[in-house]
Image: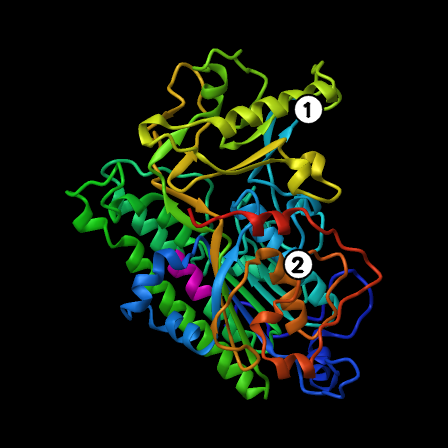
Amino acid sequence: MPLISTHSSRLPGGASRLGAGVLALLLPLLPTGVGCGHEAPPPKVLVIGLDGGTFELIGPWLEAGELPRLKALMDSGVHGDLLSVLPPLSPPAWTSAVTGVNPGAHGIFDFQRVDFTTRTTLLETGASRRVPALWTLLSDGGRRVGVVNVPMSDPPDPVNGFMVSGFPHPDSIGIAYPEALEKRIHRFGYRLDTMGGKLLPGHEAELRAQFLDTFHARRRLALQLGAENPDLDLYWVVFTATDRMQHFFWKFMEKDHPFYDPALAPEFGDSIKDLWKEIDAAVGELVDQAAAQADDQGRELAVLVLSDHGFTGVHRAFRPQSFLRHPTDGAEPVTAAYSLETNASMLYVPVEGREAGARRTQEEQQAMLDEIHRRILAARDTARGNVSPVLFGAKAKDIYTGRYVDKAPDLVYLPRNHYYFINEAGDKDPFGTPEFTFSAHHKLNGMLIAQGPMFRTGLLEGKQTLLDIAPTVMYLAGLEVPGYMEGDVLTATLKKDYLERRPVRRDRSEARETGGTGETIRSIPYVQ
């Protein structure tokens, strides 16, 4: 018995509309170009998200032939780095990918946000997103969509199709649309991602098995839902096990990692690679399934494989609070800054009218921000060749644009490779060996592979960002790109004749933000 029916007559908005099944039959008759007379249906679009994927990690395995399906997609398509957002965390990153705007516009900067009245943290969810995701835009445009496990998409949106939301999950119910689907996926054995997690000594095999079990359950569900819904115009599936496994098992494969254990390496050193082999197979299964469906319908297939950020091993900890409160150069201690419990690379300085009880004026706050920023940029790890722990740092107003910049942290930092900002003060040294159970964290440069008859082949030059993904999917689906989207259609990935037959259409009645996040990200020398 199928998990969900092939067609749904319910569309978002509550208005009376054509049923999805009728629309699906009409789509092949709808022109997709402007003034070009092209009446072929738009391609079927398959997006596979591999959380934390980076060519820097998987490159050797690709060349060794250990990831044959990803390698085949690269060889027959175009590939290159895909830059994340600031900070390069899953919530703002995936949300920017599906909205085409920066965190200052969609309103999500982390897994949590600050309640300024109490200076406590609150969980962010998909309800925090202030810009419609592309699956809603496609649904409104008469396209059928399927979405599985995109982070920061709980609660699910009422789409023209189906949606299984991604973490974080405030509850174990209300995770899927339509309701009939949710009632069945739990019986199907589907497992939800959870927040946090630790790798306790002696429990390595247990944690690895948990990650693998969750991945395989998601793989089975994604394939079954894809098989039962062959008429999808967009199918977007995200596998997050890559991120989880890399966070905790990196130290077993990297011999120069401070926590490398030669006694455990033989058993756990290939955990990440072995998972990527399974990921490779799952990618192949989803591509084969979608290709057969597209062929049966006389359509082309566009495949996008992408990640939300890259990854690197964590070798050193930097404690900005300790550094500011215990200066070694004779300067006055700074105790004004605070940060989220889970993210010390984003700092806040209280200001009157925002934090309850704060007496610092905006002018005074700005002066304090200047001083904190100057000090952190000047910090040097003398035990590691006098290197700075900071690759990039800026004030929120210089990197974000949009209605929700006031929600952003006042200062944002991107750690240098192998450094991690940890939220500890007290009397601990500003620099030291990490004291947490994950051994790797995020990096700015993720990955992108685009394959299909509309894409060219070879290495993708330039600096593409996650902001470009939503406009590109809208274009591939044959719809006009909303004017407010800050990203651009990735025309560099497309063949010239395809663009001539299907020119990009953008709504010019809506102004889009310029500068800000996209230009900032492209200016960062991320390969360091």
Q: Is residue 217 magenta?
A: yes
Tell me if 192 is positioned left or right of 488 in this view. left
Q: Amino acid at mark 1?
A: Gln
Whether residue 220 is situated above or below residue 361 in the rendered picture: below
> Picture coordinates of residue 215 (x, y %)?
39, 57
On screen, residue 504 versus residue 82, left or right, reads right
User: In the image as oriented, which residue stretches furthest toward the left?
Assistant: 263
| Residue occupying image coordinates x 71% and y 63% | 137
Q: Position of residue 294 (x, y in %)?
A: 55, 82
Sort mark 2 into few (<14), some (14-19) or many (20+) by Cα contacts within 10 Å.
many
Q: Earlier in the sequence, mark 1 or mark 2?
A: 1
Q: Residue 403: image x %, image y %?
A: 75, 42
Image quadrant assignment for residue 425: top left
The residue identified by callout 2 is 487
| Left or right position of 502 against 495 | right
Is residue 82 depicted above or below 412 in this figure?
A: below
Does residue 49 appear in this view? no
In which image quadrant can residue 113 be found?
top right
Q: Is residue 488 above or below residue 2?
A: above
Q: Secondary structure at mark 2?
A: loop
Which residue carries the number 1 mark?
366
Instruction: Tell me where the magenta segment starts and ends, as one range.
Output: 215-221
For marks 1 and 2, give the CA distance. 30 Å
Residue 98 colored in magenta in the image = no
Cβ atoms under marks 1 and 2 closer than 8 Å: no
Q: Amino acid at mark 2?
A: Gly
Q: Nearer the viewer, mark 1 or mark 2?
A: 1
